[in-house]
Image: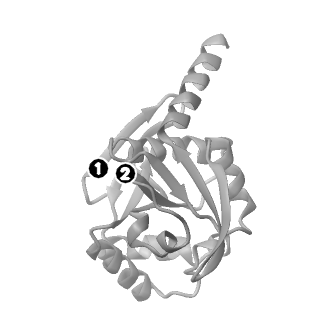
Amino acid sequence: MGAPAVFGRDVAGFGRIELRAVDPGRDADLIHGWVSQERARFWGMRDAGRDRVAEIYRHVDSLPTHHAWLAYRNGMPAALFQTYEPAADPVGEVYDVQPGDHGVHLMIGPPVRPERGFTGQLLGVLVSFVFADPEHRRIIAEPDARNDRAVTRLRRTGFVDGPLVDLPDKQARLMFLDRPSRASADASHRRSAAVR
């Protein structure tokens, strides 16, 4: 697996989720295999060759404001997750960045087999990872406005819709999840689980 885990969580009935920093050289084949598929069309890298993918992630790795992670489930790569400071990103030019804002991108890897609840479980762990830093007060997502599945999944996780904005490569739906809303959703989930 390479790099040591920077975050890990055991999810009952789902398994162990760990985040490891992307190594552009080592992980380029895996990431290229994911981003070149039709299902990854909203990621915007379908036509990028393996070397271009490695170059992109070397660039991300050089930035102190942007980070790329691979999420592993029970030791197997499951998703590509990116975090960034909105003020240092084009998205920071289209909305009023607040102190404590932290941006995210998520691409789920090709499933071995379809599994109900997979994305929701994984996204919950990734949100926990971002909020593990007490300076992160609000998470910003900016899915392509045409990506109905991503928008719906983020809403189910507690994100609320912001405006439609024009970014260099897409029209995006800004979506926001603040720390108090996440804590309230977690408490509600625990109460409903206890009743079952």
What colour scheme governs how the chains and residues are painted in the rendered image of this protein? one colour
**Camera-side residue: 160 or 191?**
160
Q: Which mark is residue 5?
A: 1
Q: Nearer the viewer, residue 156 or 174?
A: 174
- The kind of secondary structure element at disc 1 is strand
* Residue at (61% x, 55% y) in the render: 175
Give the numbered dot on residue 79.
none
**Which image quadrant: the C terminus?**
top right
Q: Quick one: label 2, few (<14), some, or many (20+) residues within 10 Å?
A: many
Q: State the separation of the CA atoms marked 1 and 2.
A: 5 Å
Instruction: Tell me the kind of residue under disc 1.
Output: Ala
Image coordinates of residue 25 in percent, x first then y, are 30, 77
At label 2, the amino acid type is Leu
Would you say 183 lies left or right of 149 here?
left
Residue 43, placed above or below residue 178? below
Picture quadrant of residue 68 = bottom left
Q: Toward which corner of the image does residue 189 lie, by quadrant?
A: top right
Q: Are marks 1 and 2 in contact (CB under 8 Å)?
A: yes
Where does the N terminus fall, quadrant-wise? bottom left
- Foreground: 83 or 194? 83
Dot 2: element: strand
Residue highlighted by disc 2: 19
Residue at the image position 39 percent from the left and 76 percent from the top: 28
Q: Is residue 151 above or below residue 132?
A: below
Asked whether the viewer can see residue 88, the reply is yes
Give x and y (percent) for residue 69. Answer: 38, 60
